[in-house]
Image: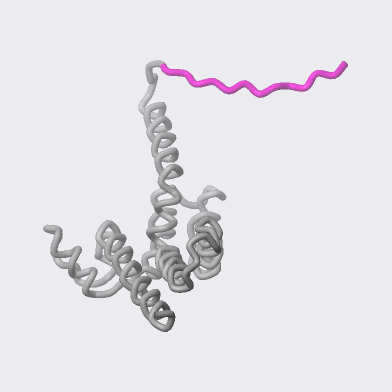
Amino acid sequence: TSTFPLPKIGIDVGTADSPEDISVTLQLILLLTVLSLAPSILIMTTSYLRIIIVFHFLKQALGTQQMPPSQLLAGVALFITFFIMAPTWGVVNDTALKPLMDGEITMEEAYDKGIEPIREFMFKQVRDEDLELFMSFTTVERPENKSELPTYILLPAFALSELRTGFIIGFFLFIPFL
């Protein structure tokens, strides 16, 4: 009889023997946090928000409460978002993920290289008024150019711009049905 080896998985809580042990633990916690926030990150850094709002306006305009189901609209919006974001994600993959997986760059370098195409996409869509609004909420010095603008200011400004644009498009599509 041949035996099939079963994997052993264990979680050990103990004292750290070196700073590297703590570093690995913190990296694991950070990774789990990012994975749990991944759906929110996907929604907040892509065109998904705009698309799903427009779909719901169309659903209301047609007067259909049950068809198509909201889950179907969310799925279609997700696939359209993948299509729209494919060029941006391709650049992220080529400049950040592949070199990181090949051990050519560090995690910090991968983040810096990977966030740039996403920021570029968001800058193309964000309204200057929304950037100004969120800049007014902070005590950060006014940046000289877009590359100096912190991402934590760009993200909510982009989300607000996407909401606004989605509602405008949805409203204009809704009007003919009145």
- 55 or 67: nearer the eye? 67
Hey, which quadrant is residue 49 in on the image?
Answer: bottom left
Q: Position of residue 13 (x, y in %)?
A: 42, 18
Hey, which quadrant is residue 158 in on the image?
Answer: bottom left
Hey, which quadrant is residue 163 in on the image?
Answer: bottom left
- 80 or 100: nearer the eye? 80
- 169 or 4: nearer the eye? 169
Residue placed at 48% from the left, 62% from the top? Answer: 65
Q: Position of residue 164 (x, y in %)?
A: 31, 71
Q: Position of residue 98 (x, y in %)?
A: 55, 55
Residue placed at 32% from the left, 63% from the top? Answer: 159
- 40 or 107: nearer the eye? 40
Q: Does any portion of residue 93 appear in the rendered image?
A: no
Whether residue 158 is in magenta: the answer is no
Q: Does any portion of residue 60 appear in the rendered image?
A: yes
Q: Position of residue 46 (x, y in %)?
A: 43, 64
Q: Quadrant of the N terminus?
A: top right
Q: Is residue 135 above or below residue 106?
A: below
Residue placed at 56% from the left, 59% from the top? Answer: 72
Q: Quadrant of the C terminus?
A: bottom left
Whether residue 5 is in magenta: the answer is yes
Colouring method of the image: one colour
Q: Is residue 111 above or below residue 81?
A: above
Q: Which residues are magenta?
A: 1-13
* Magenta stretch, main secondary structure class: loop
- Give left or right: position of 58 versus 171: right
Q: Is residue 95 above or below residue 124?
A: above
